[in-house]
């Protein structure tokens, strides 16, 4: 096997592959649990659906902005590239430090463990199977992606279809339980008081459930005709996600009622159990396992390309920046990310890491979208087939909303938010030492 940083990625992803990456990157396990939290913080089904619609529209604004950013810089690395060009190497390094080294492997470890939990339940396996299954899933995904983006995209497309099939079944069953009484969605739950302003707290889990739409931009260097394909795939994929999320919540509300949804620990399984009994929970466990496995595939592929771009920039070990000459895959970066995710899986420390890095992830989104203002000024005359509509309103709304979410998160969980900022700040001396070491090596 020969590796060389001079080799580039091959553009093999079409619009449907891109849309599948968006859908798979957003729909993981959150939609099967988060709606219960949203219902707890609202008084009826109407604000529940309104919050999911608002969250979808806000996220769509960010997706449309990412469409233009991806069209301007259609190469691997996504936000890291935009930050490096607009704000310099330090902010880009801090983003990579937080995301590629902590958030990506942490999310893979967390979701792989969720996959293994549901897979073992569906197969009737004892609890000690969870960690071996999670490690096996990560190893298998990394192995498939060693053979290039086509192999990874093929696997991703299969699991996207499977997760959409599970969601479709959930929607159909939920609506069937309504027996024509859709008005129950709007019934006010008087069993518990909802504090004034609680809708702000209810919007937080909604926005987090819509996260993950940036992975396609991480793989932009492998998208065919990216100036046209990227914006279309992003919009198509996110439109599909918004539709699925709204219909799933309607199914939950008509199947369980607002009070039942708020009290449920596993609303998807509860809805399925109403029709299929004990087998319903097994069916849903299989669906959630497929959904979470698909997410892990995208997170590994996208995260590895951020690591590879950092390595090629000598912001990380240079070997990680190599691209395999035969398969055009970042094999070293894939191996590094996979090994670190496995370490986090076996140690069980990923949960707290994910809490600590949530603020850093959303700060990356806010500053990533903010680079659009810099690109518009610096390259005002650059011809593009796609520009974000309603500029500068859409990026302004998205950035302000994300910053608002960060402030609300910091107020609600000051310890986690503070640790997130500490992790980011620790990257500053690491960056200084790394640059010093690189200069010593070069000189």
Image (cartoon, grey):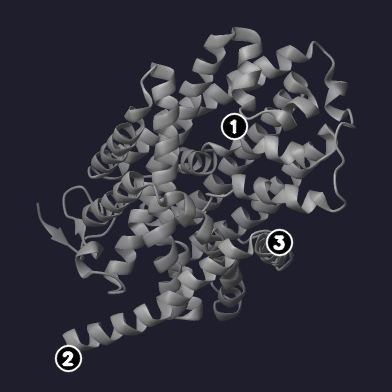
Instruction: Measure the alpha-carbon separation of dots 2 and 3.
Output: 47 Å
**Which quadrant of the rendered structure holds the C terminus?**
bottom left
Q: Quadrant of residue 435?
A: bottom left
Q: Secondary structure at mark 2?
A: loop
346 lies above or below 184: below
Q: Quadrant of residue 102?
A: bottom left
Image x and y of residue 283, in percent:
51, 16
Image x and y of residue 267, in percent:
64, 26
The residue positioned 72% from the left and 17% from the top of the image is 175
Residue placed under numbered mark 2 in the picture: 443
Residue placed under numbered mark 3 in the picture: 408
The first of marks 1 and 3 along the sequence is 1
Q: Is residue 230 left or right of residue 433?
A: right
Q: Is residue 4 left or right of residue 174?
A: left
The residue positioned 42% from the left and 50% from the top of the image is 350
232 lies above or below 406: above
Label 2 vs label 1, nearer the camera:
1
Out of 81 and 171, give the one closest to the viewer. 171
Residue placed under numbered mark 1 in the picture: 32
The residue positioned 84% from the left and 35% from the top of the image is 46
The first of marks 2 and 1 along the sequence is 1
Instruction: Measure the alpha-carbon separation of dots 2 and 1.
Output: 54 Å
Can residue 75 be seen from the camera position used here? no
- Tell me if mark 2 has few (under 14), some (14-19) or many (20+) residues whose alpha carbon lies within 10 angstroms of its own: few
């Amino acid at each position: 096997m020969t590796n060389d940083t001079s080799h580039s990625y091959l553009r093999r992803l079409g619009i449907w592959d891109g849309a599948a990456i968006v859908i798979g990157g957003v729909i993981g396990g959150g939609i099967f649990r988060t709606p219960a939290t949203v219902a707890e913080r609202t008084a009826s089904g109407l604000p529940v659906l309104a919050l999911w619609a608002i969250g979808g529209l806000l996220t769509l604004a960010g997706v449309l902005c990412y469409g233009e950013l991806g069209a301007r810089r259609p190469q691997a690395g996504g936000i890291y590239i935009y930050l490096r060009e607009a704000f310099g190497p330090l902010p880009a390094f801090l983003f990579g430090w937080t995301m590629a080294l902590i958030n990506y492997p942490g999310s893979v470890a967390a979701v792989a463990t969720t996959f293994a939990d549901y897979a073992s339940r569906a197969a009737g396996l004892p609890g000690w199977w969870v960690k071996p299954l999670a490690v096996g899933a990560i190893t298998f995904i990394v192995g498939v992606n060693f053979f290039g983006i086509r192999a990874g995209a093929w696997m991703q497309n299969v699991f996207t279809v499977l997760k959409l099939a599970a969601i479709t079944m959930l929607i159909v069953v939920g609506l069937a339980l309504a027996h024509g009484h859709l008005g129950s969605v709007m019934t006010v739950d008087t069993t518990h008081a909802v504090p004034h302003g609680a809708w702000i707290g209810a919007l937080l889990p909604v926005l987090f459930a819509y996260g993950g739409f940036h992975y396609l931009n991480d793989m932009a260097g492998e998208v065919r005709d990216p100036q046209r394909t990227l914006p279309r795939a992003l919009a198509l994929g996110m439109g599909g996600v918004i539709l699925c999320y709204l219909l799933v919540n309607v199914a939950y509300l008509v199947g369980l009622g607002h009070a039942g949804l708020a009290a449920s620990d596993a609303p998807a399984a509860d809805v399925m159990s109403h029709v299929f009994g004990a087998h319903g929970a097994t069916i849903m466990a299989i669906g959630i396992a497929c959904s979470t496995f698909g997410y892990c595939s995208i997170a590994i592929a996208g995260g590895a390309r951020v690591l590879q771009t950092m390595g090629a920039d000598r912001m990380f070990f240079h070997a990680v920046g190599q691209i395999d000459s035969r398969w055009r895959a970042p094999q070293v970066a894939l191996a590094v990310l996979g090994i670190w995710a496995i370490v986090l899986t076996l140690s069980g420390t990923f949960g707290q890491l994910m809490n600590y890095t949530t603020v850093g992830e959303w700060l990356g989104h806010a500053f990533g979208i903010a680079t659009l203002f810099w690109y518009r000024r610096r390259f005002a005359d650059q011809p593009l087939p796609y520009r974000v509509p309603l500029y500068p309103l859409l990026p302004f709304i998205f950035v302000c909303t994300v910053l608002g979410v960060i402030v609300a998160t910091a107020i609600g969980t000051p310890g986690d938010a503070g640790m997130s900022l500490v992790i980011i700040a620790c990257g500053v001396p690491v960056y200084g030492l790394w640059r010093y070491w690189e200069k010593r090596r070069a000189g």
